[in-house]
Image (spheres, rainbow, N blue to C red):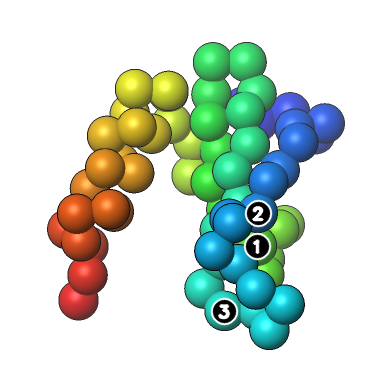
Amino acid sequence: MMTEDAMWRKSSRSNSSGGACVELACSGDLRGVRDSKNPTGPTLRFGQARLAAFLEEVRTGRFDG
């Protein structure tokens, strides 16, 4: 479970006008991903290796519509 004191970091690709931004945080062995516009909403949780694999899939465009 992500702890309440997890330090969330916004994507470096984020800008001041909002946009489709995500935040990442580390909590023990877990890595969290959430929508920066909805910080109290759902959080995806991954182990470090799974997050690395997920991010690689995002970079290659696997989830592009």
* Residue 2: x %, y % from top left: 65, 31
The span from disc 3 to disc 2 (Cα, nearest Å) is 12 Å
> Residue flagged by tag 1: what amino acid is it?
Ser
Q: Is residue 53 above or below residue 33?
A: above
Identify the residue position indicated by label 1 in the image. Answer: 36
Within the image, what quadrant is residue 61 found in?
bottom left
Instruction: Say whether marks 3 and 1 touch (CB < 8 Å).
Output: no
Identify the residue position indicated by label 3 in the image. Answer: 19
Q: Between tags 1 and 2, which lies in front?
A: 2
Judging from the image, what secondary structure is the residue with disc 2 in? Answer: strand
Judging from the image, what secondary structure is the residue with disc 3 in? Answer: loop
Q: Is residue 26 left or right of residue 6?
A: left
The span from disc 3 to disc 1 (Cα, nearest Å) is 9 Å
Q: Is residue 22 above or below residue 27?
A: below
Q: Earlier in the sequence, mark 3 or mark 1?
A: 3
> Residue flagged by tag 2: what amino acid is it?
Lys
Instruction: Say whether marks 1 and 2 touch (CB < 8 Å).
Output: yes
Q: Nearer the viewer, residue 13 or 5?
A: 13
* Residue 10 numbered mark, or none: 2
Direction right: furthest residue: 5
For image coordinates 72% across by 57% down, the residue present is 40
Within the image, what quadrant is residue 24 found in?
top right
> Residue flagged by tag 3: what amino acid is it?
Gly
* Residue 12 numbered mark, or none: none
Within the image, what quadrant is residue 53 found in?
top left
Q: Is residue 21 left or right of residue 58?
A: right
Figure quadrant of the C terminus: bottom left
* Residue 26: x %, y % from top left: 62, 28
Q: Between tags 3 and 1, which lies in front?
A: 3
Q: Is residue 60 left or right of residue 47?
A: left
